[in-house]
Structure formats: C-alpha cells, structure tokens
Amino acid sequence: MGRYLGRKAVLYALTFFVAVTVNWMIPRFMPGDPVQSMLGRASVSDPQARAAMEDHYARLFGLDVPLWKQYLGFWGSLFQGDLGTSVWLFPTPVTEVLLDAVPYSLVLLLPAILLSWVAGNRFGAFAARSRWLDNTALPLSYLLTATPYMWLGVLLAWGLGVVAGWFPATGAYSFALTPAFTWAFLSDAFAHWVLPFLSLFLVAFGGWAIGMRNLIIYELEADYSAYLRALGAPRRLVRRYAFRNAMLPQITGLALQLGTIVAGSLLTEVVFAYPGLGSLILEALNNRDFFLLQGAFLFIVIGVLIANLVVDVLYVVVDPRTRIQMQGGA
Amino acid sequence: MLTLDRVSKVYRVGTFGTQPLNAVRDVSLTVPPGVVVSLIGESGSGKSTIGRMVLRLTPVTSGAIAFDGRDVAGLSGHRARKGYYRHVQGVFQDPFSSFNPIFPVDRVFDMLRGAYFPGLSDTEWRASVRRGTERVGLDPGQVLGRYPHQLSGGQLQRLLIARALTLDIRLLVADEIISMLDASTRIDVLNLLGDLRAEGLGILFVTHDLALGTYVSDTTVILRRGAVAEMGPTRQVYASPRHPYTRGLLASVPRMHRTWADADAELDSAAGPCPVHSGPGTAGPVEVGPDHFVGCFSDDACPE
Amino acid sequence: MSLDTAAASGEGQGPSGRRGRDDLRFALRNPKLLAGGTVLAVLLLTGLVGPAFTGGAPNAYVGPQYAPPSGDHWFGTTSFGQDVFTQFVHGLRATFTVGALGGGIAWVLGMAVGFLGGYRGGLLDEFLNMLTNIVLVLPAMVVLIIAAAYLEARGLLVQSLFIGLTTWPWAARAIRAQTFTLAGREFVDLARLSGRRPWRIILREVAPNMYSYLVMSFILLFGGAVLIAAGLDFIGLGPTEGVSLGLMMHHSVAWGALHLGTWWWFVPPGVGITAVVGSLYIANVGLDEVFNPRLREL
Amino acid sequence: MTVEVSELRVHYRTLRGSVQALDGASLEVGDGEVMGVVGESGCGKSTLGKSLIRMDGRMRHVGGSVRLGGEELPIADDRAMQRFRYHEVSLIPQYAMSAMNPTRRIGRMIRELLESRGVRYAEVRRELERRLELVGLGADVLKRFPIELSGGMKQRVVLVLSTLRDPSLLIADEATSALDVANQRAVAEALVQFRDRGFIGSMLFITHDLALVAQLADTVTVMYAGRSAESAPTSELLRRPRHPYTRMLLSAVPEVGTTIDESRQEGIPGSPPALLDPPSGCRFKDRCPLAFEQCATRPPFIEVASGHRVACWKAE
Amino acid sequence: GGYPRAQTLYTSGTQWGPPSTWNPLAKSQYATGTVGYVYEPLFLYDPMKDEYRPWLAEEGEWTGEDTYSLTLRDGIEWSDGEAFTAEDVAYTVELGQIDAVPYSNLWDWLEGVEVVDERELEFTFSEPRRQEWANWLYNEAIVPEHVWSERSDGEVVDSPNEDPVGTGPYAYESHGQDRMVWAKRDGWWATEQLDLEVKPEYIVDIVNSTNDAALTMLTQGEIDLSNNFLPGIDRTLESSPEITSYYDEPPYMLSANTTWLVPNTEREPMDDPEFRRALAHAVDPQAIADGPYGGIVAPADPTGLLPAWEQYIDQDLVEDQGFSHAPEEARSILEDAGYSENADGMFTTPDGDPIALELIVPSGWTDWMEAADIVAESAAEAGIDLTVEFPDDAALQDARATGDFDLLFNNERQISNTPWTYYDYMFRLPVQEQQTTVNFGRYENEEAWELTEELARVDVEDTERTAELTSRLQEIHFEEMPIIPLWYNGLWSQVNESVWTNWPSDASGTPHWFPTTWRNYNQMGAVLTLTEIEPVSG
Ligand SMILES: Nc1ncnc2c1ncn2[C@@H]1O[C@H](COP(=O)(O)OP(=O)(O)OP(=O)(O)O)[C@@H](O)[C@H]1O
Ligand SMILES: Nc1ncnc2c1ncn2[C@@H]1O[C@H](COP(=O)(O)OP(=O)(O)OP(=O)(O)O)[C@@H](O)[C@H]1O
Ligand SMILES: [Mg+2]
Ligand SMILES: [Mg+2]
C-alpha cells in the first residue's frame, strides 16, 4: 500500500512539476504584457508619466530579470505560498484573491460532484433494472451528458430565472444582505445557489448514470452474480453486490472526471455570475492578469491532484483487490 | 541441435520492476533432431517461459541457448532472426487465440509468404500451402479460406503445425498445444507430432498432463518452480521416479484403471534421500542412472 | 461520460462469434444506433450542404433585428439582424470540423501512445504511461483556457490542435490496455515468429482486432472535442473569426438574449451541440451493444 | 434422493435459430450416488447442469422432465425453482476462481447469502467451520477476501459453501478442471468424502476427463450432441463400453506410461454435428464406423444390462 | 445586518473585479467612488455648463504669467477628525515627484509649490500649461498628509490604503467578492457649507460579471443605476417605463468619448492624406449606430469633438470641409489623387500596386467587431479593399504600440475640460518606438503639435483663443485626416426608478449632472447626482 501510494505520489509530484512549468511558460512565451494591460485602464494619458509607471510595475512584478531567474524565483515563492500579486486586483496578493473566491466554487462544486455521483449511480443502477426504464432513462442521460454545461445553465437561467422568476439568475447572494448566519441570508444564498448547482448537477448526473448502468450490467453478468443466483440468492442481494462492485470503477471515474467537472463549473459560474474561480479566471484572462491566472490554474491543479490522491487512497481502502495485491499477496 | 546451458530467467515485477521473480533457474537440456523432449510441471513452473526463450520471444537473463552451436540470443537484426525462425517455430496452447479472429485462417500462411517466399508465384504458393495442409491430415478445401471460429480446435492446431512445416523447420516448440483440445482430437495431434518426430523433427513439448507427456516423448523434464526436478528418458522417469515431487505428481494423476489409493501405495515404496545432498553436493541435478538426472529435493525433503 | 465504462465494456471481444456479418445484422436492428446515426447524418448533411443553400455570409445583416422565427428567417434573427439559421448551419459545420479535427488529433495521438506503450512495454511504456497520467490529471479545459487566452490568432485549426493535444490521454490509456492484452495473444507471437516487423504487427494484427473499440474512442473524443470547443467559444476564447455554435451562444448571452427573451438566438446552438454530441453518444451505445455480445440481449 | 432426468430438451435462443443443446438427455442417479457426465466439448453437459438449477435468459425448456425424489422440478419456472435452489439442488461451478464477490470477505458473503435464503448464520457457523476443516481450511479463511486464496482453496471454499445446506443433488460442473493434479485430487476426494458423510445426496460430476470420472464416480453417463449415449456403472462402462462413441472415446485416452511407439491410439474422425440444425436420427452416425440404414431413425436409450443403458441400434 | 432597500443605492458598471484598493493614486484599480465619495478634488468641472465649481478649494487664480494661487475652504475636516490644510494639498502635489505616481509629468512644467498659510498656496510654473493645470486641479484627489507621509515612495503608489481617510460624504463600510459598500458619513463639509446632502445611506456598487447579468439585475430592480454597456437596452427603454436614461429617445445616452478609425500613417497608402480623406468619406457611421448599436450611439461630428465641446466646433469649416458617408465622393477623391480602379472596381495606388488593408479589432469586442464589418463593407463600396481581423486584445495592443497595423479603432480619450486632451491625442509628438497612449497612427505634423502645445497654455477662461486654436486644428484635421471620427460612445447610463427617482435627464426640472459612477466622472460632478436623487418611498 505504501509503495502504491508512493508511486502515485511520485506521479502527482511530477504532474505538479509539469503543471507549474507549463503554467509558468505559457504567459511568458505568448503575446501580451500584463503591465501594459494594467496601465491600459489607468487613464494616464501622458506618455512619459506612463513610461515611468511601466518601469515601476515591471520591477514590482519581477519581470525585469532574466527568464531563468524568474522561473527559479517562481518556484521559490511558490513554496512560500506566494503566488505573486494580482495585476488586475493590484495590490492584492493572488493567494488572497483566490482564497476569497474558492469558497464559492467549493460550495458549488462539492455538492454537485458528490450528489451527482451518488444520485447518478443510484439512478443508473435503477435504470439497468428493466428494459423499458433502460430505453427511456438511458437516452435521456446521454442527452444530459451531451449538453454543454453553460447552455444548460443558460436555459435554466432563462426558464427558471428570467421567465418563471423562481430563482435569482445571478450572483451568490442578494446585494441587500451581508453574509451572516441568519436564516434570511442562508435561504437567500441557497436560492442563488440552486440554478448553478442544478446545471452542474444535471450534466454530471447523466454521465454517472450511464457509467453505472453499463458497469452494473457488466457486474450482473459476472461469475459471482451467476453463482449467487444459482444458489437462489434474491435479486436484491445480487444487485447490491453488483452495485457495490460497480461503484469501484466509478470511484476512479470520479477522479478522472474531476477536471471536466471543474471546467464545467467555471463555465457555469460565468453564466450565473457566481463569484467563484470561474468568474475569476475569466476576468483574469480579460485583464491579462497572468499571476492570477497562474495562481488559479495551480489552485485547480492542486485541488484536482489532492482529490485524485484522496480518491486513490479511498480506492485502496474500499477495493480489497488493490490492497491485497499491493501487500504482495496472491 | 538445441542446447540450453544453465538458462535462467528473472522477470522484474512490482513497482518499477523492483521485485525479481525467478521463473526459470539454471535449466540445462538438449533437444537433438528426431527427439521429443517434454517439459512437464504445474502451472507457473516456467515451462512456457523456456519455450518463449527458445523462440526468442523473451530474452534470456543468464545462461545460453544455442541452436546448432550458434548462440540464439546473439542473433541481432531482423535478418538473423528471420533466418532463425526459418528453422525453429512454435505452436501455442490456445488454437483460437493463435489466429487473428477477424481474418481467414490462411493468413497465418500468408504472413510467412511475405517474409520468406517473396519470389513464389501465386500458384506455387497455393500449392505449397495445400501440401502443408495435407501433410497434417487436413482437407485443404475444407479448411482454407475459412474463419478460425468455423474450425475446430484440433483443425486449428494442425493448421498451425502445417504453417510451421511450410518452412524447413528442424525444431518445433509445442507449448501445451493439446490442453485445450477434446480427448478425441488430442490424440490425433499427438499422433501427428509422433509422425513428425519420425521424420527427424526435434520437438520441445510443453505440457502439464503427465499422461500425454509420456505418449510421445523420448525425454521427460519435470520442472518445479523453474528448476529441473527430474530429467531422464521418459520410460525411466515414469517407471522409477526418484524426486518426491515427481512421485507426488504421478500419484495424483487420475488413471482410468488404477485408483489414487493404489497409486499412493505403489509409489511410496520407491522413496530415498535427496541425491544432491546425499551425493556430491553440487548445485545442479545429479545423475542417478543413465541420462537420468534428479535435482535437489529442495524445501520439503531437503535441508539445503 | 464515463470512460472506464467504455474500457470495461470494450474488452469483451472474444475470438468467438461470427463477427462481421453478425455485427451488421445487429447494427441494423439496433434502435439506438439507428436513431443516433440518423440524427447525426441529418445534422452532418445540414452542416455540409446547408451553407450552400442559405447563401450569404453567416454574419451578414440580412433582416430586421430581433425577429422571431418565421418563414423568412426560420430560426429568427439576432439583435443585429443576422439570420440565426444561416449562422446555425455554418456553426454546425464548424462544430463538425472541430470534432473531427480535435477528436482526430487526439485519436491519432492516443493510438500512437497507446499502441507503442502497450506493444513495446518496458521502460518506454513506463515513460509513456507517466506522460499519459500527467496529462490525464491536468484539467484539459483549464489548460486550454490558459493557452487559448494567450494565443494571438485563434482559429478552428489551432483550437482543434490544442484540444487534440490535451484530450488524448484517456484514449491512450484505454488503447494501451487493449493493446497490452492483444499483444499477449498468441497470434501476435505467431506474427513475430513469421518475421514481421513491430509496426506491421501493430497495424495489421493488433489494431484490426480493436476496430470497434477504436471507433468508439473516436466517437467519444469527437464528442469531447465538440463540448470543449463550445466551452472555450462560450467564454470568448473561440475562433476569432467565423461562426461556431459556441460563439453563437457567447454572442447571444453577451448581447442580452437571455434577458430580452430572444430565445431563438441561444436555443438552437445549444440544441445543435447537444444533438450532435448526444446522438454520437447514443449511437456509441448502439455500437457498443452491437460489438459487445454481453450487452446484446439485455 | 434419486434424480431422474428423462428426455430433457433445452434449447438456446439465438438470432440464427435455436441451438438444440440438450435434445433428449436422460439419466438416473440413485440416492447417494455420484454420476460422472462426460462427452466432447459442446455436447450439452453444462447445459444439463444449468437446466437442473437455473436456466439463464436464453435457455428454453422445450420438453422432458426432471424429478427429484419423485417430485417434479419446475425447471422452467424460475420463481418456483427458487425454493429448491441451494437447499435441494446446489452447484459447484467451473468458475470457482471468480465465483465469490471479490470485494466481500468470504465469511460475510456467506452470511449474507445464507440470511437472504432465510438461514441464520449463527446456527450454521459451527458446521461451516467444521466442514472447512474437513477440506483442510482454517476458520480464518472466512475473514479473508477471495483474492487472498489460491485457486485450490477457493475451489474448496466454494465446495463447502455450496453444500452447506446438505443438498439432495449437487451439480459439479468441471469443478476441478482449472486445478493442477494435486489440487484436483484433493477436491475430488473431498467431494467423495462429503457424499460419504451424507452432506450431499446425489451428485452429477460433469467433466471431460474420463480418468477422473473413473476415480470417483459410481456411474457414468456419456453424452453426445445433446443426448445421452450411454449410461452405466463406472467399472462396467470402462470395461464393457457398448456404444461405439464410448468405445472410441476411451481408446483415444492414453494411459500414463503408454507411448506412441508401443500402442498408437486413434481419435474419433470428424467432429460433432452443429446443434443449430442437427441431423435426424442417430447423431453419431456420420462418424460411426458401424452406421447403417437404421441409424436414420433415432435409437432409443434402452437398458441393455442392469443399470446399463445405451442409445445405439448396434448395441446388444 | 442588511442594507434597507429604500435607503440604499445599487450601482454597477465601473468595478470589474473585487475591490482591491482604495488608493486614489491607483487610477486603474481603485474601488468605485474612492475618488468622489471619499477623496475629493479641489474643483469639480461641470462639462454640461463648462464650468469649474470650487470644491475643496474656495478659489484659484493666475496671479502672474507663471504663478497660480489657491485658496482652500475653511472648516473642512478629514474623516478622522484632523483638519484639512494647505499642507495636504502641497503634499499631494509633491507626490508627483515620485515616478510611479500617475501625474508625475506635472513636475515637468511645475516648478514649485509653496504653502502660504493654512489655507493658501502658491504655485510657480516653469511652463504655464493652464489648460492642463485646470485639468489637474479637478481631476486629482487630495490625500491627507498626516496619514500618507508615513508611507514609503513605493507604498504611496502600491498600498491598497485599506482604511481610506477622506473628506467626502461616504466612508468605507465593507466589501466582498462582488460588491463594494459605502456608508454615508456624518459631518461632510458640503452639507454645512453648500447645503448639499447625499441621499443614499448606503451605496452598494456591484462588481460586474457580465453586462448580461447587469441587464437582468437592472430590470429586476436589483440595480438602480447601471453604467454598463447594455446592448439592446433601447428595447428595454422603450418597453419598461421604470427604466430610463438621460434622453428618452435615441441615442438615449450622453456621449462620453469618440471612436475613431485610426490609419497607420507610416504605411502606404495611409501615408497619403488624400487617401485618408477618401477613407473618411467611405465609412458609414450611421449604419454602425443603427446596426450593432441599435441607435444607442450617435454618429460623430466630422471633427470628432464631443457634444460637450460643441462651442469649439467650427461649423463653417465643417460645412465646408467636413465629410459624410459618400462613396462617390471617396472615389472621386481617389481618382483625383491618381489612384486608379482595377478590373474588379478596386483602387490601386498611383504606382499601380494593389491596395489591401486590414482593420484590426480585439476579438470578443462584439460591438466593435460588428462595426468593423460595416466599415469593411462601406470601404468596399468605395473601391477600397479592406478586410477585418480580430486578433486577441493583447496582440492588438502590441501591434498598436509598435505601429504594426494598417487600421484600427480607438477611443482612448474621454470627455474633459478642454479639447486640448483631444488634440493632444491626435497630434502628440515626438512619435516614439512605442506609442502607448496617444497618436497610434504615428502622424507627424510639427505645426499641429505646436498649436496643441499652445492650446495647453491658454487660460481656460479664454474661450476665444481656445476656439481660434481649435478651429485651426480642425482645419488641419480635415486636411490631413490623421484619425477619422466615427461615432460617439455613450456615457452608458440607465436607471431603474422604482427605488430612487429624480435622476438626471435632459428634461427640465431634473438635475443635469452626469449620471455615472465611472472613474474620473465624479470629478465632473457625477457625485452631485447623489445629492439630487429622491427615494420613492420617502
Ligand atoms: N511477462 C511476464 N512478466 C512477469 N512474470 C511472468 C511473465 N510471464 C510469466 N511470468 C511468471 O513466470 C512464472 C513462470 O511462468 P510460465 O508461463 O513460464 O509458467 P508455465 O509453467 O508455462 O505455467 P502454465 O502452466 O500456467 O502455462 C510464473 O510465475 C509467471 O507468473
Ligand atoms: N448462450 C448460448 N447461446 C447459444 N448457444 C449456446 C449457448 N451456450 C451454449 N451453447 C451451445 O450449446 C451447446 C452445448 O453447450 P454446453 O456448454 O452445454 O457444452 P459442454 O458440454 O458443457 O461443453 P464444454 O465441455 O466445452 O464445457 C454447444 O453447442 C454450445 O455452442
Ligand atoms: Mg504456460
Ligand atoms: Mg461446459
């Protein structure tokens, strides 16, 4: 087990290294100058005054030293948890900007990922029960997964938000409120959360349902199921076993899909103007804030890596096969 | 013709290949022309590994395999290898998976044509394929052009032998070629091997079935955990097995006309001490009779 | 879409069964394959020949602004007076292009890495596997956002290339696993004994045996590429010129279609994407059922 | 309890028509008897085994009946069969390696299975452990996962689990084929021992290994292309086979120690008929050296000596 | 706690990211209202009336050719209770000595500042750029010396100044990812001295996510004042009575800046004034205003001078030399200048080289992208081959700075107190390797630049001289056409009157301030809007 996780850890460390390097490289080898874009918004019209400011900020962001120094410095400060200063939200440190946004994303993502996973799996297992269900539920699930996150978001915002007016279609909570542990605030925040959550949830839900449906059919055909049935075990038990075993690949699937769902949440946040990482990335893009962009990217990568690691560990715990193989047994 | 000299194979398994797995240990044997050598042993004893090393499908870790005195491992380059395969061919356990399921069976022949008979005209080639097919007792009209699933396992195995015979092979590695076949077809394939042997073909016959091992072979090699437990002329090994492992195997083989209990009683009488440790104390198998070698009893019956 | 499922279900290809003919027979009887295939064909045809019929540039102002669907403008017009149907038809074409190119590039890469790793094994495999895993864990979309953001000229080709470069890993992984089992099959050994060169063996012996699987990977990659491209387009990182369904959504939302109730502007592109990807997926299940005897009778 | 299978016909539905996998199989197993069922691959042995306990979705009961201790088994009725499964009729499958849920500890799986069949685990726990001990396994296997056991151990666990309810009929389909000779012997002997101790009533031991049957079966039924060809007490069958198929089959199996040079044995020419559209009459006639006109009609499966039945016009 | 709806003003359209700094010197970043609500300038400039309104200052006066004296109001206190004095003003001016301070160029022509007494200062200039000085006086906010002097030079510019201490009517209340909240402060000097009172207890400025979201919120009454560019707003304005804008008919909005078509005058054939003039006649701003903008912008005057500078537009000149959409005219100009049509009806240069121009517009700027297409179409009509490219914004900025382009759109100059800013943009010399803020077309004309420089020195009161100079500049503009004015971008401003009424409009009886929260507009009186609006339920 230790060795297995050790191997995974090496893999993740390498991934992290690659991610950081790519992340550092992209903005530096592509056109666009963050300082220019920052000053672009300052209404400083005098060329000389502007030139002086450019110098100042280039020095401040450390863009005036050779690339290799920038790269090493990048790693150095990274280990000190310093992701630099946001250009767009100057002078806020990137870490701070991200930490402000991350809770929103998490509040959206965690329930969406977990609930869609649980519900999708249940539904998929349920759909595999009969031909009729299968033939109706399955295409529906496929359509759901085929739906672009943002479009579903747009439809929901329009249908349930603008037309029906049941839920607010933008923001995380009413502007009339200040965050507090009050009923008014929580219910308001919840109402704002429903639509973005729903659009994430539905798309992911479809995917899990399909995955589970296919896996459970596979499991129901497995030898152990046949044996149980031959010994007269009731459907319930057979299904329960099949479900449990089909969950295992779905756990790995969860790790694999994390990236996609995270990306989906970025789009959803944009649609609903939900103030999470997605909106932040979009703004960072528009403002050429490459420090923030790098930070956000790293945040996501680290998040995904950690989640993967958690899933890996979880997998080892729930699947005796991996655990025993790793102990060198059998 | 083929000699294995203290051949060992270590697979690297586990993370980053850190764990060694000794699949074959210090195996030495020879396969002269016109002789069938059976390699017998339980699952995982390294039989197939030896076969694959001879066929150059797996590299040797240590020791030497020589064919006609030329080191087989030293054959480098596509040409040299092709030359080797002209004389040495293999047939494997699963006839169904030996054929690419989506092509007609002729494909196994056609693959050879490209590499070995580029000059042959279509008619010449077809004739030679037909000849090969007939030689293994098949009706070419019935089998050629068909898909693997349309033929029986016995037919397929024979086709594979026919394929090997298209080349001028002198050594055939037959890896469990009968274990997936029905009792009635097995015997046909075995008979075919016997006929080929009579024509001077050397055969390395890999099996786990003792009964079938005796039927065609001249020399029997009993493998255990990658090492030779007992090796000798077939008749002698069966008549007076010296290694406890061989005896155990023989006692467990179900026989039509003798019960297990009877076999136990019969074999118990021939027990003796480990010849390796009671004798000269060398590492390798010890000769206990003419051409009859016995390895260390290891673990169970021997201190080592 | 769970990729593992595909991997799990793809493996059940025994040597048994009367492949080719049987497959066709099942294919023609499979409602999912038929339905998916038909929708796809209609959309493809629309994308292919549609632009010739609608005439005119997709971004030209041809009608009144904000006109709801009518006989003149089947899908209505945008706030600029562009014909939504014309845009839709051109967008479909772009969507298919991105899918085919992006999916295709990823497919080729996935095959190259998968075949090579699965067949050769050893250190090369370890390395490729590592590479695959690295790219696999990186969230493709986010990488793409970052990369696209800094691209000077963004066109369909570049977009497809980038998508292809980031989405191949799971296909590589699955193909590698398949290749690995197939390479252990005896007919591959036999091909080696017949003096064949590795690449020939891969292409002529191994690959044909997973054709159904390869087709399905392509379908999934195609769908994935379409969705990713739509996502990029939507946040304004799409091609800087031309139309695509994602860009249509982007424009419609940016120009307040949601609020102004011009649903005909943002509904068709989404329906288009969902229909393309959905029908692909559904056809894919159909294919799966056809190729995979285990699922046939369920 | 005795088992009587008479003229059982079970077909597989396929796209190309029905495969007549079992088309008139008959056999009788006395109480406490082990019957070996042998025959070439594809002759319907497994189909017979499955029919007696659980038919899968593609199988169709076309005719014939199965009686267990005089009572008719409702083999075509999945629901009605439920009562008999495990308690009366049980199975050791060929796939013992994968017969247990890989993600459950064995003990827990057994408990859940038993409780789902209305048996209190606690009540049988001791017996379970005792029987495990009989086959040479400690009670600690219950705490393990299947993957932690070797093939032979798994086969033995399945053996114990399948027979825990003391079934009147046990179907062992290729139960030892995947094992090496030493393990094969151990499991086979355990089966006989269980029968001797009365844990199992009758047993159908399905295999293609005639020699193995010779070791443990009381009677043997030889099947050919979905039908019973010959049925007799083991020693009788080995010594005096009446059906030409049986004879040829026996002569195709070399004894340990015989070599090709001493006595060359021959196989059965040709191959079994396709069951999708089998020939009428005796199904062996195309390969039979004795075939004559009458073989165009199906020979009855009749008793030619005490307990010895043959389906051949030429058998006296 | 919450903000009672009836006492809270919700605004949006300025803040494009979470508030991150309250430093008035961080001109591109500071939270909406930092200048105006908290920090205040010495004067306000009212472009509607072209009038300076003494604000922190009581009065200012040129006492000599090179000296200016300033008197401050009495009795103003900083929000921390310290008195506001001449030291603070002097300190703020001195900050310009730091390079990174946006107005560091002030010291190129300012010689010194001297505190005469608590309320009096004296400025001496090395070059009396009076228009530019006036510009400074109302644009820059005064910061408290007692707080700021503790900061290092770097901190002065880069500190987020989290706890802003100002003289204005509001104080920092809170901020979040998506909002900035200001709370009304007791003791604002103007209440006592000018009888002005800001009405909202709270101002919640909403961080824009998308214009789309803003539109939704505006129509749902969640935003009172939206300064977002809302495409399609014309339809909403027509259909929803509670949503209003400054004018109740097209173009609905006041004008804030001019969008120009900027030709690169270093490239052929744009180096030819005749060609540029032909181009000017070819384009069709009306089609742009009607098309992508749906009428919410107006085509620009040929001079490009904003309506606020109307008095300086030389109407006779425009009559005489101005241009309008006239493809035929464009063709004849080209023909006269020696250009000739090829077989496709497209013009080639007098040398016979084909002309193929590329107009670049940032990708994603949809309205501009649409407008560019229209420009291309109308150019084609006049026989000029012009294609449109949509590079990424950053790439475009690079190209623009280095002069690596044919044509582009630009609107860098906002409304101000003087057309000098406008001509400074058009004619600024010398042309440098990198042109980052002005004269992207790299047009060189010594005479025009000298005139511009002279304009900078004219006293703002001296409208006659200003008009004279601008008239001459307009003439050069028409002759040379270094930039081609297209349309006026609106001062995007739309309000939902369901909570607050009495918003500025052109109707009589309503206030005439700029209804906007944009940066630098508070200094132009926008802040006074807050003193005029009235709660509906109150
Ligand atoms: N490619 C490989 N990598 C690692 N280990 C291997 C490999 N091939 C075989 N082994 C291991 O080497 C040992 C010998 O295997 P081999 O296939 O030679 O046995 P065998 O005697 O042929 O067994 P069987 O009767 O099952 O075919 C086994 O433990 C096997 O697990
Ligand atoms: N699911 C199925 N669908 C169609 N035909 C089947 C199916 N299962 C088995 N058959 C056919 O039925 C016949 C009998 O099969 P069965 O499995 O009973 O044979 P068997 O005697 O057990 O053979 P083996 O010794 O190979 O296990 C064969 O011809 C086989 O091809
Ligand atoms: Mg082997
Ligand atoms: Mg069977």
Image (tube, rainbow, N blue to C red):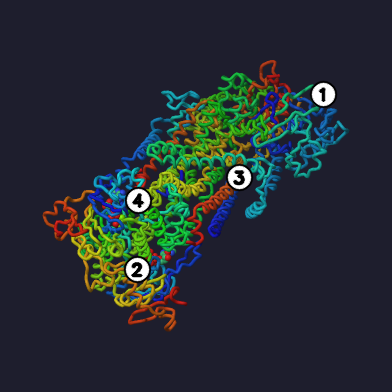
Any atom of ligand 1 within 8 Å of the CB at mark 3? no
Q: Label 4's element?
A: loop
3 or 2: mark nearer the eye: 2
Residue at the image position 63 percent from the left and 38 percent from the top? E442
Q: Position of residue C297 (x, y in %)?
A: 34, 44
Instruction: Please say whether residue C128 is visible from this viewpoint.
Output: no
Q: Nearer the viewer, residue C190 or A204?
A: A204
Q: Label 1's element?
A: helix
Q: Pointer 4 and pointer 1: residues touching (CB < 8 Å)? A: no
Query: Tag 4: residue type?
Result: Glu
Q: Position of residue D202 (x, y in %)?
A: 31, 56
Query: Tag 1: residue type?
Result: Gln
The single residue placed furthest to the bottom in the displayed view is: B280
- Residue D88, labelled with which disc? 4
Q: CA distance from mark 3 to mark 4?
A: 65 Å
Give the residue at mark 3: A296
In the picture, residue D310 is in which quadrant?
bottom left
Marks 3 and 4 on same chain: no
Q: CA distance from mark 3 to mark 1?
A: 49 Å
